[in-house]
Amino acid sequence: GPIHAGYGFHLLSRLEKLQSGTVFYDSKFYDTTDTVEPIVRRLADCGVNMFTVCVDAGLPTLEAAARAKGAYMKLLGVVTLTSLSPVGFDIWRQGMISLFSLGYADGMICSPREVAWFREEFTREGHLLVATGVRPSWAELNDHARSGTPFYAAEADYLIIGRPVTDHSDP
């Protein structure tokens, strides 16, 4: 992510010391087990609470990330980006079902448009739902093809609003 690329693990370690909340590292890891596993261990050492892995990186990568995350970290699967059109939703849904049936992910990333479906389909205790592409009605959509207002994402455990806040002149 941009924070890691620009500032590295040093900043993540400092955040861990200062935090009173949750550190979410939206890494979208898509790499080999030998690359992902040590990075996830380092993120755990830095106090990161949640991180993302692309589901199509494969089962060995998901297993490696799950092994390395420790007991308190949450692995969130990314099946498709919110910048992709709704056309691939059936593929996304099948990926979601497959991932949860394997039990490696602690939760999923989805757009506000899929929150209600997710809550209905996956009601197991402890699974997190993180909605990304959340945009207030006044905000630009940017590159999100499947976005929605906070109202549509209200059933999610966490909302990622991002650029409407970070790019605003008075956040």
Image: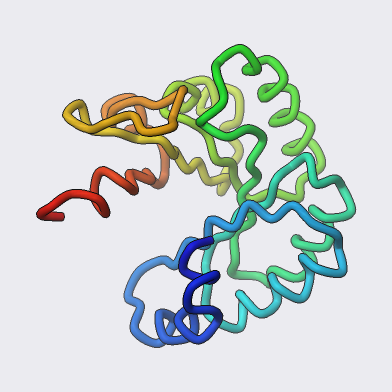
Would you place residue 15 above or below residue 122 in this image? below
Q: Residue furthest left?
A: 170
Question: In the rendered image, which quarter contains the C terminus?
Answer: bottom left
Residue 108 location in percent, x, y? 59, 41
Q: Nearer the viewer, residue 141 or 19?
A: 141
Would you place residue 13 above or below residue 114 in this image? below
Residue 5 location in percent, x, y? 54, 70
Rendered residue at 59%/45% (across/down)? 107
Residue 33 location in percent, x, y? 86, 63
Rendered residue at 65%/45% (across/down)? 77
Would you place residue 150 above or below residue 85 in this image? below
Q: Please tell me how many numbered marks the rendered image carries.
A: 0
Would you place residue 18 above or below residue 92 in this image? below
Q: Is residue 144 left or right of residue 8?
A: left
Q: Nearer the viewer, residue 90 or 103?
A: 90
Please name the colour scheme applied to the rendered image. rainbow
Residue 121 in which image quadrant: top right
Residue 63 location in percent, x, y? 83, 57
Q: Residue furthest top?
A: 87
Rendered residue at 55%/40% (across/down)? 109
Q: Nearer the viewer, residue 157 or 28?
A: 28
Q: Is residue 147 left or right of residue 5?
A: left
Rendered residue at 83%/55% (across/down)? 61
